[in-house]
């Protein structure tokens, strides 16, 4: 049997990004740049680094900005061709050459579980990765998805990336608990979406990187709305954890919460100093 691998990566990007209004009035939050690159492109590059070549994007009402970004712009190519500015397009050209992009629309906002289920038509019957592009990960030696893929090859079950958060921030995340079976690798036996600190099973928070086995779609279909009356992927994963096992993985690297203005500014400062200027 050939080695299990993952080729498709799902990007839920239908949210309104209200915390960033008016910037997100006409462009999706995932298109906001950290220094000179949209959040979504960082996520797509991470997936490509992990060997994935099929990007499935869940959009909201307006997908134009995302679609335009991941397609060649002939006029722009003509404009910069042969000039000193041409190298600015190297990164995105590589991305466009390395992957195919497909899109589907999430009509109603009924939670992350619902968004992922919307992607079933693009994913089909295979394990896949999920990237929430507003969790921006910096991991120069090996990207977080690539780290998770290695683990998937060994355990062949759903995997969530986790990190320790301050106890008073558990209400922002899915929070897990379980048994550490290898250093940094936890077999999950409890999972709660956005618990108050007193109800949190630990301070290990799920961040926006998942590997999900194909049966997740059936499980989501049977998952009733939970926190905030939305269908939560955390609840579906708890069912999977009971059925067959789900792993929490303390990834190597640094995560920036670009869903908040503070985290977004922090990411901009960090990437400016450590990536952009370092390449200058
Ligand atoms: C979602 C998930 C949550 C997870 C978080 C990571 O929440 O529901 O379990 O911890 O992403 O960023 P959101 O940030 O969309 O509210």
Image (cartoon, grey):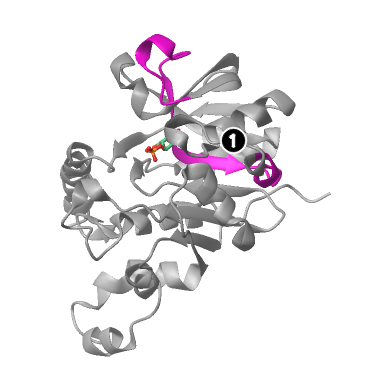
In percent of width and height, residue 128 lies at 61, 50
In percent of width and height, residue 44 lies at 43, 57
Who is closer to the viewer here, 224 or 178?
Answer: 224
- Number of numbered tags placed on the structure image: 1
Q: Which residues are magenta?
A: 193-219
Q: Tell me the element at label 1.
A: loop
Question: Within the image, what quadrant is residue 154 found in?
Answer: top right
Task: From the viewer's perspective, tell me whether residue 150 is left or right of residue 277.
Answer: right
Quadrant containing the C terminus is bottom left
Question: What residue is at 33 percent from the left and 14 percent from the top?
Answer: 167
Question: What residue is at 34 percent from the left and 44 percent from the top?
Answer: 136
Residue pointed to by mark 1: 224
Question: Within the image, what quadrant is residue 23 found in?
Answer: bottom left
Question: What residue is at 74 percent from the left and 48 percent from the top?
Answer: 3
Task: From the viewer's perspective, tell me whether residue 259 is left or right of residue 149.
Answer: left
Question: What residue is at 44 percent from the left and 72 percent from the top?
Answer: 96
Q: Residue furthest top?
A: 198
In percent of width and height, residue 204 lies at 44, 20
Membership of 197 in magenta stretch = yes
In percent of width and height, residue 39 lies at 31, 54
Q: Residue furthest right?
A: 1
Who is closer to the viewer here, 133 or 61?
Answer: 61
């Amino acid at each position: 049997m050939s080695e299990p691998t993952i080729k498709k990566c799902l990007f839920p990007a239908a949210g309104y990004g209200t915390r960033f209004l008016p910037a997100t009035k006409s462009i999706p939050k995932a298109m906001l740049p950290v220094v000179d690159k949209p959040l979504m492109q960082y996520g797509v590059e991470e997936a490509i680094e992990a060997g994935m070549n099929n990007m499935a994007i869940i959009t909201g009402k307006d997908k134009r900005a995302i679609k335009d970004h991941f397609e060649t712009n002939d006029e722009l190519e003509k404009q910069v061709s042969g000039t000193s500015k041409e190298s600015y397009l190297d990164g995105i050209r590589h991305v466009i050459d390395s992957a195919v992009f497909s899109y589907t629309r999430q009509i109603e906002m009924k939670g992350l579980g619902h968004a992922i289920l919307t992607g079933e038509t693009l994913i089909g019957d295979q394990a896949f990765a999920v990237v929430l592009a507003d969790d921006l990960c910096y991991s120069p030696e090996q990207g977080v998805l690539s780290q998770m893929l290695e683990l998937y090859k060994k355990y062949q079950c759903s995997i969530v990336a986790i990190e320790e958060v301050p106890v008073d921030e558990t209400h922002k995340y899915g929070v897990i608990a379980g048994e550490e079976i290898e250093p940094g690798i936890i077999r999950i036996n409890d999972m709660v979406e956005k618990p108050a600190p007193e109800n949190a099973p630990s301070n290990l928070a799920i961040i926006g990187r998942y590997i999900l086995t194909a049966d997740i779609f059936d499980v989501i279909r049977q998952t009733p709305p939970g926190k905030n009356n939305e269908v939560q992927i955390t609840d579906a994963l708890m069912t999977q954890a009971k059925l067959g096992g789900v792993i929490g993985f303390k990834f190597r690297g640094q995560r920036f919460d670009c869903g908040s203005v503070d985290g977004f500014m922090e990411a901009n400062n960090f990437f400016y100093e450590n990536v952009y200027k370092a390449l200058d």
